């Protein structure tokens, strides 16, 4: 099975490959825009699981803004 980086590298038409800047922007509205672009991505679920499993600290992965996700309360 290919890893997510291998899959994204082999799929240049993904929104995050075509225009990566909004996915790692300092501006929350740009990251929100990027997250909406993930909606039609065939790798959405794999991307989201990869980001959570590898604890990505920043950027939009699988329609999740990791910076915003860090502010959510955790289940206890
Ligand atoms: S779901 Fe992941 S691979 Fe797909 S466009 Fe969004 S960030 Fe890129």
Image (spheres, rainbow, N blue to C red):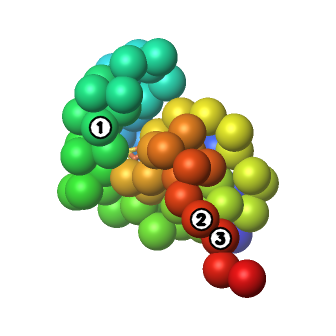
Mark 3 neighbour class, 10 Å CA radius: few under 14, some 14 to 19, many 20 or more: few
Comes first in the chain, label 1 or label 3 = 1
Quadrant (top left/top right/bottom left/bottom right) for the C terminus: bottom right
Q: Which residue is mark 3?
A: 74
Which residue appears at 69% of the width and 44% of the height? 56
Estimate the x, y position of residue 20 in percent, counting from the top left: 42, 23
Which residue appears at 49% of the width and 24% of the height? 24
Q: Which residue is mark 2?
A: 73
The numbered mark at residue 42 is none
Q: Which residue is mark 1?
A: 32
Which residue appears at 44% of the width and 52% of the height? 64
Which residue appears at 66% of the width and 80% of the height? 75
| Any part of residue 2 in sight | no
Estimate the x, y position of residue 7 in percent, counting from the top left: 55, 50
Q: Which residue is situated farthest in the right direction here? A: 54
| Secondary structure of the residue carrying numbered label 3 | loop
Mark 1 neighbour class, 10 Å CA radius: few under 14, some 14 to 19, many 20 or more: some
The CA span between labels 2 and 3 is: 4 Å
Mark 2 neighbour class, 10 Å CA radius: few under 14, some 14 to 19, many 20 or more: few
Quadrant (top left/top right/bottom left/bottom right) for the N terminus: bottom right
- Would you place residue 74 above or below residue 13 in this image? below
Q: CB atoms at circles 2 and 3 under 8 Å apart?
A: yes
Residue 17 located left or right of residue 15: right
Foreground residue, 36 or 45?
Answer: 36
Front of the two marks 1 and 3: 3
Residue 21 located left or right of residue 68: left
Comes first in the chain, label 1 or label 2 = 1
């Amino acid at each position: 099975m290919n890893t997510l980086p291998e899959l994204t590298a082999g799929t240049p038409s993904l929104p995050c490959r075509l225009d990566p800047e909004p996915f790692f922007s300092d501006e929350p509205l740009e990251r929100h825009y990027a997250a909406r672009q993930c909606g039609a991505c065939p790798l959405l679920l794999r991307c989201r699981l990869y980001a959570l499993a590898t604890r990505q600290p920043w950027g939009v992965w699988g329609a999740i803004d990791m910076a915003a996700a860090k502010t959510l309360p955790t289940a206890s």
